[in-house]
Image (cartoon, rainbow, N blue to C red):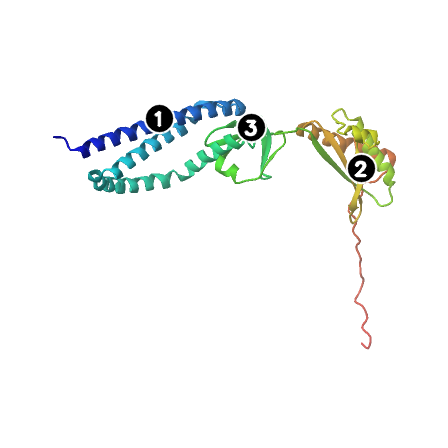
Amino acid sequence: MIDTRYIKYAVLILVCLALATVISKLTRMALNRFFKSSSAVLKVDPTRFSFVKNTLTVVIYLGAVIVIFYSIPELKAVGLSLFAGAGIIAAIVGFASQQAFSNIVSGVFIVIFKPFRVGDNVKINEMHQGIVEDITLRHTVIRNFENRRVIIPNAVINSETVVNSTIVDEKVCVFLELGISYDADIDKAMQIMQEEALRHPLFLDNRTPEEIENNVPPVRVRVTGFSDSSVNLRAWIWAGSSADGFDMKCDLHKSVKEQFDRQGIEIPFPYRTVVFKSGKPEIPGQ
């Protein structure tokens, strides 16, 4: 006669394996749907996420095996011995692949939260700036403005400050900052900066209808402070994108300087006062 315990054990094993199979299939279906939609946004190959799906499948079945071994007393002692040895191996492998796994998890977070996408203009911690060219589970490829590829691990990007110039609105406000001498005509200098900015083909009028109705100037120029030898002016000028803003700022540096020269407005050099002393000073009583 068959012991009823073995029947219960067999049923337990079948139930655990069946649940693991169902959970694995449902998880893979959900991940396939999520990765497919995310890959369309990020413009990356969805097959790159197969490693994550396979890893989760292994974890689910491994959990089922652990439940089986710990639920059957006859297998529990054997399971403890096996898992103790496997634990040492897993610890060694886990320690060796810690950085790689961290990059994978960080890549998944980038896919989920989308701090940047392929084609975005980003700056990473004031060090690297360029266009995002590719996003993988391990690293992100940025093409800088020298046409070089900067490959940054995802774990590094997740711990750094990312400035994304195109995630919502590509328009940028360019600061044109110049210093003029103290005896120069401030109003004339401010007028020249406004006129040159309005004349540039890349200038963008970013005023709201209310600001236009209230006659707010399209280019604002203010005195921002005083230096040792100059009065500092700043103009707020809008452009359609970061690239247009950079080109416009370079052009305005040239055109404003030329207009200043024609109108007699000086951009001063730093001044130094040098005092020459001849002989030693006389000391009273000597």
Q: Is mark 1 on a helix, strand or loop?
A: helix
From the image, tell me which residue sits under label 3: 117
What's the residue type where badge 2 is placed?
A: Val
Residue 24, x across and y down, in percent? 36, 27
Foreground pick, 23 / 259: 23
Q: Which of 122 and 180 is in front in this view?
A: 122
The residue depicted at 41 percent of the width and 29 percent of the height is 52
If the image is split into quadrants, where does the C terminus sit?
bottom right
Q: Is mark 2 on a helix, strand or loop?
A: strand
Q: Please state which of residues 1 and 104 is positioned toward the viewer in this rendering.
A: 1
Mark 3 or mark 1, which has the lower sequence index? 1
How many residues crowd around disc 1 within 10 Å: few (fewer than 14), some, or many (20 or more)? Answer: few
Q: Which residue is drawn at 78% across and 51% down?
A: 272
What is the x, y in percent for residue 96?
Answer: 37, 40
Q: Residue 261 carries which label?
A: none
State which quadrant residue 258 falls in. top right
- The three-letter amino acid code for the residue at tag 3 is Arg
Separation of marks 1 and 2 at Cα, in angstroms: 66 Å
Dot 1 and dot 2 residues touching (CB under 8 Å): no
Dot label at residue 221: 2
The residue carrying mark 1 is 22
Which callout, 1 or 2, points to the residue nearer the camera? Answer: 1
Q: What element carries label 3?
A: loop
Tell me: 110 left or right of 68. Answer: right
Q: Nearer the viewer, residue 252 or 214?
A: 214
Disc 1 marks which amino acid?
A: Val
Residue under the image location 50 percent in, 38 percent down: 156
Name the outermost residue toward the bottom: 285
Give the alpha-carbon distance from disc 2 to disc 3, as whole Å. Answer: 35 Å
Above or below for 132 versus 93: above
